[in-house]
Amino acid sequence: MLKTTLTAAALCLPFAAAPAFAQEVSEEVQAQIMEYLASVQCEMDPGDIEVEDDGYELDDVFCADGQYDIKLDSDLQETGRRKE
């Protein structure tokens, strides 16, 4: 019984530990986001753009007054900014 339980747990472990597949951001959307950031005197690595259900999260954005995580809605309008 214990051997069966351990085997079942071992088989499930790779699925539990596997990262979720990140949705890719199109080049067009990346360009629009980078253009927006430049207009507000910020920059970031496009690889740090994450797709969320309701828009995008921009991690490690460097602005004139510090580093931020920024949230954009699906229309690329800023909905939140958190200083790191």
Image (spheres, rainbow, N blue to C red):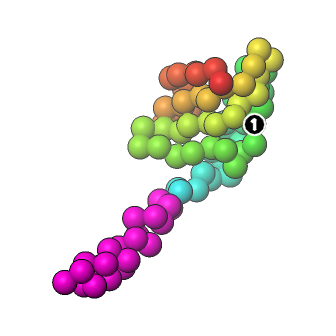
Mark 1 crowd level (few <14, some 14–19, many ≥20, 10 Å Cα): some
Position of residue 67 in the picture relative to residue 17 (left or right): right
- Residue 14 colored magenta? yes
Q: Quadrant of residue 33?
A: top right
- Measured as percent of width and height from the top left, residue 60 is found at 69, 34
Q: Residue at (50%, 61%) from the top-left corner?
A: 19
Position of residue 41 in the picture relative to residue 60 (left or right): right
**52 vs 73: above or below:** below
**50 vs 78: above or below:** below
Residue under numbered circle 1: 44
Q: Residue at (60%, 28%) from the top-left corner?
A: 70
Q: Residue at (58%, 56%) from the top-left corner?
A: 24
| Pick the front one: 57 or 82 | 82
- Tell me the kind of residue under disc 1: Met
- Measured as percent of width and height from the top left, residue 46 is found at 71, 45
Residue range (magenta)? 1-21
| Pick the front one: 31 or 17 | 17
- Measured as percent of width and height from the top left, residue 17 is found at 46, 64
Q: Quadrant of the N terminus?
A: bottom left
Q: Secondary structure at mark 1?
A: loop
Q: Quadrant of residue 40?
A: top right
Position of residue 79 in the picture relative to residue 4 (left or right): right
| Pick the front one: 1 or 81 | 1
